[in-house]
């Protein structure tokens, strides 16, 4: 594939610059400000000593997420959804995606009667806010679980694996990695891919914006996504440090599908 130069000077298979600042929020059990190019998302993890009503008595915990964009995170001011009195469909979709992604690598039985809330607040948006939210929320979750492990004398953090996400697409008839907003607005195909550190797929969301796309294009985009997610997980590992990394692991059991009945 030719080394196509993109609107921001990258070639087709290069991520935007990624930076994660942990401990960004004073009060949260875990927090990180993730920078992905010009996108900024503050991810915080909060531990609550109760579970949703439908899980009471099960001995199992829960991990869930909320997502929101600040009014001036984009080029024009957006009205707060709270002011409208309801969440939009896009917000619901992203919250459910983040929650599913984080639960896919968490030992919920080890949590006991606890809920961990992942709040993902977009401070500045330039494409890829949902994928940055997943990648950053994993770091916030790991920090919160490390604190819980210390408080409860757990030998291991109840995480089976890493999880991260990235966007890919077809822009100017070429598959590219990690779309900025301009590329996303021009893309012939737009796809978000969520994967674990062991290479398992959690979710693949792909749309042919201008019509159907070929299987060969799909394979090229998935290959780019795998490359990008490997790099993102390497950054997660570096930010979390060897001590936390050494406490993760364990064999993930095959378990029944779990879903909040209100979100089915």
Image (cartoon, rainbow, N blue to C red):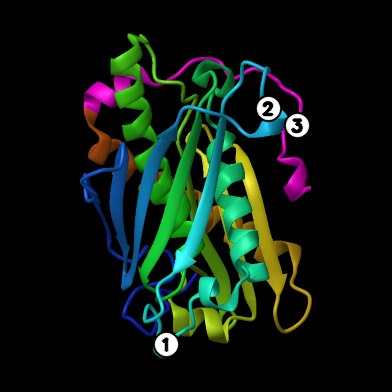
Point 74% across, 62% down: residue: 215
Point 24% across, 40% down: residue: 239
Give the structural element (helix, strand or loop) at label 1.
loop
Residue 251 highlighted magenta (yes or no): yes
| Nearest-to-viewer mark from 2 and 3 | 2
- Residue 174 makes an appearance in the image: no
Give the structural element (helix, strand or loop) at label 2.
helix
Q: Which residues, given as a range, are shown in magenta?
A: 242-264
Determine which of the numbered discs, if any, sits on residue 257 in the image. 3
Give the structural element (helix, strand or loop) at label 3.
loop
Question: What is the C-alpha distance between the residues marked 3 and 1?
Answer: 39 Å
Tell me which label, 1 or 2, sits earlier in the chain. 2
The residue nearer to you, when weighing 61 against 106, is 61
Main SS of the magenta part reads loop
Q: Is residue 127 above or below residue 97?
A: below
Where residue 55 sits, quadrant-wise, is top right
Residue 100, x across and y down, in percent:
61, 43
Point 40% across, 82% down: residue: 74
User: What residue would you read off at disc 1?
Assistant: 77
User: What residue would you read off at disc 2?
Assistant: 55
């Amino acid at each position: 594939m030719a080394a196509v130069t993109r609107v921001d000077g990258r070639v087709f298979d290069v991520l935007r610059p990624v930076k994660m600042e942990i401990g960004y929020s004073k009060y949260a059990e875990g927090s990180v400000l993730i920078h992905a190019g010009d996108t900024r998302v503050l991810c915080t993890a909060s531990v609550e000593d109760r579970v949703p009503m439908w899980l009471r008595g099960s001995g199992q915990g829960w991990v869930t997420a909320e997502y929101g964009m600040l009014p001036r995170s984009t080029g024009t001011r957006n009205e707060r959804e709270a002011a409208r009195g309801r969440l939009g469909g896009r917000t619901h979709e992203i919250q459910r995606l983040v929650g599913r992604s984080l639960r896919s690598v968490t030992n919920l039985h080890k949590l006991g009667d606890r809920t961990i809330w992942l709040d993902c607040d977009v401070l500045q948006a330039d494409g890829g806010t949902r994928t940055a939210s997943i990648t950053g929320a994993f770091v916030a979750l790991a920090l919160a679980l490390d604190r819980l492990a210390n408080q409860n004398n757990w030998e291991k953090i109840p995480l089976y694996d890493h999880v991260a996400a990235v966007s890919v697409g077809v822009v100017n008839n070429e598959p590219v990695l990690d779309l900025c907003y301009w590329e996303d607005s021009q893309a012939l195909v737009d796809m978000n891919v969520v994967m674990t550190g062991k290479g398992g797929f959690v979710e693949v969301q792909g749309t042919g914006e201008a019509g159907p796309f070929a299987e060969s294009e799909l394979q090229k985009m998935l290959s780019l996504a795998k490359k990008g997610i490997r790099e993102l997980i390497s950054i997660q590992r570096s930010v979390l440090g060897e001590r936390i990394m050494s406490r993760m692991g364990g064999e993930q059991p095959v378990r029944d599908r779990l879903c909040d009945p209100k979100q089915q």
